[in-house]
Image: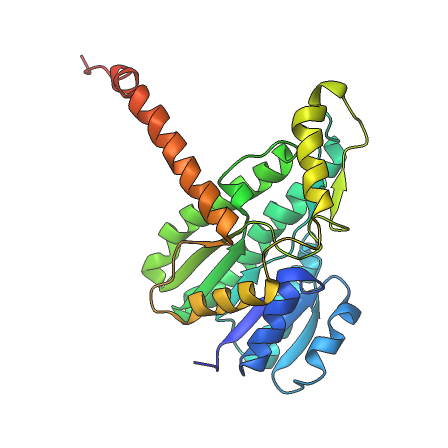
Amino acid sequence: MTNKVWLITGCSTGFGRELAKQVLKLGYKAGVAARNIADVEDIIKDYPETAIAITLDVTKDDQIKDAVKQITEIFGRVDVLVNNAGIGYFGSAEESDDAETRRMFDINFFGLANVTRAILPLMRKQRSGHILNVASIGGLVGYPALSYYNATKFAVDGFSESLSKEVAPLGIKVTIIAPSGFRTDWAGRSANEAKTEIEDYKTTAGQNQETIRGYSGSQPGDPVKAAEAIIKAVETENPPLRLLLGAAALQNARLKLENLKQDFDAWAETSIGADSPKV
């Protein structure tokens, strides 16, 4: 069904850029959103009838409202929302800067939530739609040097799971995208890092940060294949709530499940013992 209208945020680089290109190539209509629309003009130039460039900083409410108005005035509806805009930040919990981490929450979580809230009235009226929120395997598994980043993505995961139960009776679907390492700018220019360095964290947060920075651009994940997987999820009748992308994402998610089960089983008696009959 290529008459669907997509709105994709964060299309300057990475997943958003590749997804916009694939969606338009397949014949869908798309609002291609970025903070600077000059970054996406090359994408839309070949699709004058089916693509529009939208200026959108997801931390600015007026731009969110304008984006929704623009895409609905031109295409009349929004069938698929992809909340892709996001940034990274490296640093142990103790080293991290408050202003930087709050900014990351504003983009990764509150921006995503506010764009979603702006689109929901349209989808409720349509009684149809699909919201895809780009989280991370870091929304399921915590890693050293990424405590605050993980927190933003855990928030996206929890928000999306609750949202899925709220909107399912209205014909609206929700999918959480959870990638592992992909060849995007996330580990490069799209991620800031703590200015403070504490020696005690060098073998944990420091080492993991160095490893991730070191393989930026050579990760196994292919953004083109990720875009194809996301489109497949949209086109299927019963899309997953969580779509893991990358072998490392699947491996780490399964390990998390095993660790959870071990803890739950080992402490089951204590957990049950916390209840008491009401007198």
Position of 274 relative to 67 (above/below): above
User: Could you tell me how many numbered marks the image carries?
Assistant: 0
Is residue 237 rendered to the left or right of residue 68?
left
Position of 96 relative to 5 (above/below): above
Residue 179 in view, yes or no:
yes
* Residue 71, percent from left and from top: 61, 74
* Residue 228, percent from left and from top: 51, 69
Foreground of the two, 138 or 175: 138
Q: Residue at x 40, y 61 (%)?
A: 173
Outermost residue toward the bottom in this view: 49
Is residue 161 rendered to the left or right of residue 150?
left
Position of 7 relative to 201 (above/below): below
Residue 93 in view, yes or no:
no
* Residue 43, percent from left and from top: 70, 76
Q: Residue at x 34, y 64 (%)?
A: 238
Foreground of the two, 189 or 173: 189
* Residue 37, percent from left and from top: 76, 69
Instruction: State the colouring used for the structure image.
Output: rainbow
Q: Residue at x 18, y 12 (%)?
A: 279
Quarter of the image with the N terminus in it: bottom left
Q: Residue at x 68, y 25 (%)?
A: 203
Foreground of the two, 158 or 243: 243
Outermost residue toward the top in this view: 279
The quarter of the picture where residue 255 lies is: top left
Is residue 115 rendered to the left or right of residue 214?
left
Is residue 246 rendered to the left or right of residue 193?
left
